[in-house]
Amino acid sequence: MKQFIVGLITLSLGISSCQTFKKMEKTDFNKNVVVAHRGAWKTHNIPENSIASLKEAIRIGCTGSEFDVHLTADDSLVICHNDDYQGMMIEKSTFAQLAAKPLSNGERIPTLREYLETGKSQNKTRLVLEIKKSIIDSNRTLILTRKCMDEVRRLNAQDLVVYISFDYAACLKVRELDKHANIQYLNGDIAPAKIKSDNLNGIDYHLSIFQKHPEWIVEAKKLKVDLNVWTVNKKEDLQSFLDLKFDFITTNEPELLFSLIASK
């Protein structure tokens, strides 16, 4: 009986250890600051926000790949930066209408599900999901927020995803629905102390905001609020934010940023 109990304990510990290992493995992200803005697209002339640009960001080893999610007129979740896609307003068009016009590399406009499935093929690059503000009404932004989170949960991709948005209500909705979600705010109008008090994870502000408010960099570090900056493309600016030891740097020039990191 004693041996049986010991065996059960050993088995339990083994299962626990295995689960811990899997958890660590799922979140073992690349140890760098490089977030590819709309994927890694520029060097090889790949369409922005395409599956191909996400795959390239993964291939070159970015710690994150940013992308933008919209809600179509028939409630599909699609990846595109602008409110319009090839002359069609996304929120006022159906998925079938959008899908009928391919990207320059022949891909169809990606869905969030396709993006998440591609991201889940690896465990090194975060999926930095921007919840786009609705051009119709603010409630539709919150509908989009919930639908994005439902899709992330459906595919069990929570550990891979960082949510970002210019809409503060959307950020707060993410926190309401998932106490463990990683959330960064984009708009640049809120100090780190407020971000911390609202239990968000980070500020992801335009480089001009940090140049105007250098004290926010100090404050964020003191409060352990993650620092991300967008969209940094010039060599001297990239080097500046490296020197400031930002947690993440979002760029259209990930290869250039990698070369600066390697030269240090």
Image (spheres, rainbow, N blue to C red):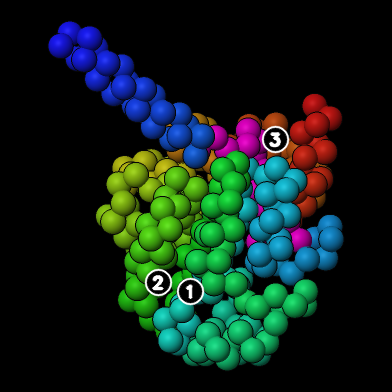
Q: Which residue is mark 2?
A: 144
Q: Which residue is mark 3?
A: 242
- The residue that appears at 50% across and 48% down in the rendered structure is 160
- In the picture, the quarter occupied by the C terminus is top right
Numbered circle sitting on residue 159: none
Q: For this view, does 6 lie left or right of residue 127? A: left
Q: Quadrant of residue 244?
A: top right
Q: Main secondary structure of the magenta part?
A: loop
Q: Is residue 71 magenta?
A: no
Q: For this view, does 126 lie left or right of residue 4? A: right
Point out the frontmost of discs 3 and 2: 2
Spatial separation of the CA atoms under disc 3 and disc 2 = 34 Å
Q: Which residue is mark 1?
A: 77
Mark 3 residue type: Leu
Q: Which residues are magenta?
A: 27-41
- The residue that appears at 15% across and 11% down in the rendered structure is 1
Q: How many marks?
A: 3
Q: Position of residue 237 (x, y in %)?
A: 75, 45
Residue 110 drawn above or below residue 253:
below
Discs 1, 2 touching: Cβ within 8 Å: yes
